[in-house]
Image (tube, helix red, strand yellow):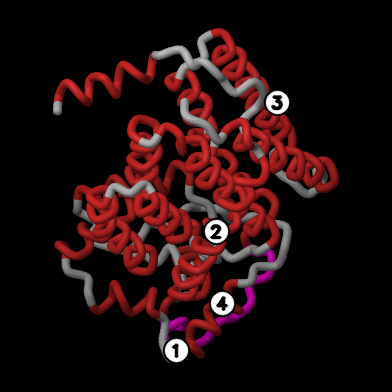
Amino acid sequence: MAVSMMKDILALFAIEKKPVKGLLLLEWAMLGYALLTLLMTLFMQTQLQHPQQMLWLRFHTTMITLALWAVYRMVPCRLTLFFRVGMQLLMLGPWYSETFEFNRVLPNLDHVFASAEQWLFGFQPALEFSRHMGWPWLSELMMMGYLSYFMLIGIVIVYYLIWRSERFLRASFVVLAAFFLFYVIYLFLPVSGPQFYYPVVGTDEIALGHFPQIGTYFMNHDATMHPHGYSDGFFYKMLLVVHETGERPTAAFPSSHVGITTILLLLAWQSGCRRLFWGLLPFALLLFLSTVYIQAHYAIDAIAGFFVGVLMFLLLQWVYSHARHDEVRKM
């Protein structure tokens, strides 16, 4: 077992006989998103708060992408290929935060989604879930489930890199492109989620079924609200750091946490390793529930995220199969 694993790790350094010559399809997906948002930045620059920083982000990301492509061309192995993919994954944080820069200029739509939630369930699951089940042990379990999101992404990508290398680029493209598709939705759909909308309106009003419009409130207000839960818990404090670092009143519908996790489960199943799938499933289920428990999402956000995730998985698998035959090979 140890010998086999050592061979798999050493294979990361083996020089590829037929390296990918041009940019990866996932890098083209990033550049396409960067171009779309560049045009939006130039068109809306008088309404944006940090247009120069946004322009520099596109320049730096493009330069780093080209630099890592050059490194891979000099040393074409799976490890340098992983660096190219890993860099794109690391840049998802800044791309996510930017969606708020665009959608903050549009009238907020949380009242529409909170009203739909009330009509569908007769109450607000995001309000009642944690209110009636605020036990410390459950809160910590939910916080851990929510934080496992980053771990799940890493596990699936690394598993494909080492043990399913012939499908590594396909899996990476599906995950990265799905993120960008979610971000395109968020650019034009200004829904902040319960953790931002509820405090603005007041939880007493929310409990009474009152969901007023707040217009462009978030144009000038972007303070991060503390997630709901057991505030003395270890995982709660970890989540608080994550929220204070990168959370913004944006990207609520549909839930990309649920959508991307659904895609990761499908990739785990498609890998053929059932232990991988069943090992990830408990964390995924906790994550699905935690998005509502910590008031990051309405329940309809999570439900929609699941179905959108399945559709994106099928669509992006088809796109990859028809777009880049030179990436579909044994590395």
Marks 2 and 4 close (CB-CB < 8 Å): no
Q: Earlier in the sequence, mark 2 or mark 4?
A: 4
Residue identified by numbered label 3? 59
Provide the residue span drawn in magenta. 204-217
Circle 4: residue type: Phe
Tell me the SS state at disc 2: helix
Circle number at residue 314: 2
Tell me the SS state at disc 3: helix
Tell me the SS state at disc 4: helix
Circle 3: residue type: Phe
Residue identified by numbered label 1? 208
Q: Earlier in the sequence, mark 3 or mark 2?
A: 3
How much space separates mark 4 and mark 1, taking CA atoms? 16 Å
Give the side of residue 179 with respect to residue 123, left or right.
Answer: right
Marks 1 and 3 close (CB-CB < 8 Å): no
Could you tell me if residue 236 is visible in this image? no
How much space separates mark 1 and mark 3, taking CA atoms? 48 Å
